[in-house]
Image (cartoon, grey):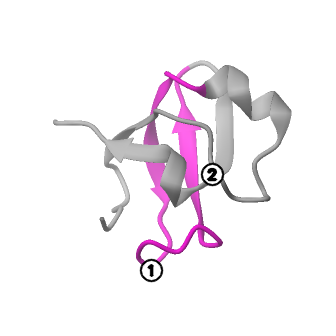
Amino acid sequence: MVFRRGQKVEVFQKSADESWESYMDEYIGLHGIITDPDATINDPDALVEVSLEGKGTHRFPQDCLRRLED
C-alpha cells in the first residue's frame, strides 16, 4: 500500500518493527492524517509521519497503519 500526503489512516495494530516503543501502544485505535509519506512501499523501516487527532505528529512504521475510506 502506498501512503499519500493527506490520506486518513488508523494506527490499527502494534508494529513488529524495532522502532515501535511501548508508549506507542496508547496510539492504537487513533485516527490521523499522513503529513509526510515515505516513497518505499511495504518497508517497515520506512517511517511515515502522521498527525494524530489530539496527540500531535509522530513517525510510525508502515505495518501498523491502515488507510481509512474518505
Q: Please say if 59 is above or below 26.
A: below
Where does the image place residue 9, in percent across and percent down from the top left?
38, 40
Q: Position of residue 12 (x, y in %)?
A: 46, 33
Q: Residues within 10 Å of mark 1 (few under 14, many from 20)?
A: few
Left or right, 65 with respect to 52, comes to left
For residue 68, side relative to residue 44 (left or right): left
- Residue 52 magenta-drawn? yes
Residue matched to label 1: 39
Q: Which residue shows up at 62% across the image and 47% down it? A: 15
Q: Is residue 13 above or below residue 47?
A: above
What is the three-letter code of the residue carrying label 2?
Answer: Phe
For numbered disc 2, what is the local secondary structure?
Answer: strand
- Quadrant where the C terminus sits is top left
Q: Residue at x 65, y 72 (%)?
A: 45
What span is in magenta?
Answer: 28-53
**Which residue is farthest right?**
22
Q: Secondary structure at mark 1?
A: loop
Q: Which mark is residue 15?
A: none
Q: Which residue is mark 2?
A: 60
Of callouts 2 and 1, the N-terminal one:
1
